[in-house]
Every structure is written in structure tokens, then in C-alpha cells.
Image (spheres, rainbow, N blue to C red):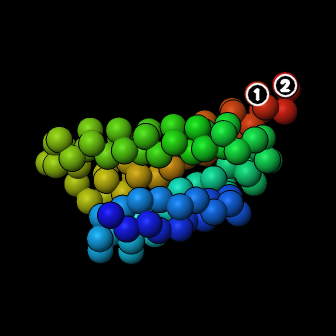
Amino acid sequence: MAQFEVSINGRSYVISCDEGQDQHLSHLAEYVDKRVKELVSSVGQVGEARLLVMASLLIADELSETFAKVRDPNSFTSDQLEEEVAKATESIADHIEHIAAKLEAA
């Protein structure tokens, strides 16, 4: 098993992965880092654990929506799918703003 270093929110983590999976792991870490940075820009540095939990929940939400759409691939035309992606993105942004408002009030 290989050891690979990733950086999320400016902090390095050493992760074990199967041989040859380091590039894939790097892409995943970049995506998580991007989502954490989006949260930081919305809510600020609210603690590493909280940011990682919030990012995990957002990503899980994206994954859940994707699974629902994959289960029925004929449910959308191309235009409808594009509209659904835009709605999902807006919904996630609304969730982030809601979380930010709660954190500011705390």
C-alpha cells in the first residue's frame, strides 16, 4: 500500500492508497479542497472539523442527487438535465448561505 500526501484547507494529510491510485486520490482531494474553500469564503474559518463535516455533507448531498438521477437515466432530456444541475447548484448555494447565517448568529 502506498502513502500519498494531500492538502485540504492548507493542511497536509498522509493517506494510504492502493498502488497506482495516487492520481485519482489527488483529484478527489482537490475536489474536497475546492468545496472546503467555498465554505470558508461563505462562513469563514469555523474550525477544521466543522468545515470538513460541512463539506462532507454537501458532497454527500451531491452524490445522493446524482444517484437518484442515474437510477432513471431516461427521466430527463438534455435541457431538463441542465436545468436540474442549475437547480441543484442553487440549492447547495442556499444551503451554504443558511449554514453561514446560523454560524454568524452563533
28 or 44: nearer the viewer: 28
| 38 on left or right of 83 | right
Q: In the rendered structure, which amino acid carries the disc numbered 1?
A: Lys
Q: Secondary structure at mark 2?
A: loop
Residue at left offset 75%, top offset 54%: 41
The answer to whether any part of residue 34 appears in the image is no
61 or 74: nearer the viewer: 61
Residue at left offset 51%, top offset 37%: 57
Image x and y of residue 63, in percent: 37, 44
Residue at left offset 75%, top offset 41%: 47
Image x and y of residue 38, in percent: 66, 55
| 53 on left or right of 74 | right
| 49 on left or right of 13 | right
Q: Are marks 1 and 2 in contact (CB under 8 Å)?
A: yes
Image x and y of residue 18, in percent: 30, 64
Name above or below for residue 66 compared with residue 1: above
**Residue underneath mark 1:** 102
Q: In the rendered structure, which amino acid carries the disc numbered 2?
A: Ala
Residue at left offset 44%, top offset 66%: 3
Image quarter of residue 33? bottom right
How many C-alpha atoms fall within 10 Å of the one at disc 1: few (<14), some, or many (≥20)? few
Name above or below for residue 41 compared with residue 61: below
9 or 71: nearer the viewer: 9
**Residue underneath mark 2:** 106
Q: Residue 63: which disc?
A: none
- Quarter holding the N terminus is bottom left
- Quarter holding the C terminus is top right
| Furthest-front residue in this view | 1
Name above or below for residue 10 compared with residue 60: below
Q: How many marks?
A: 2
Measured Cα–Cα span from mark 1 to mark 2: 6 Å
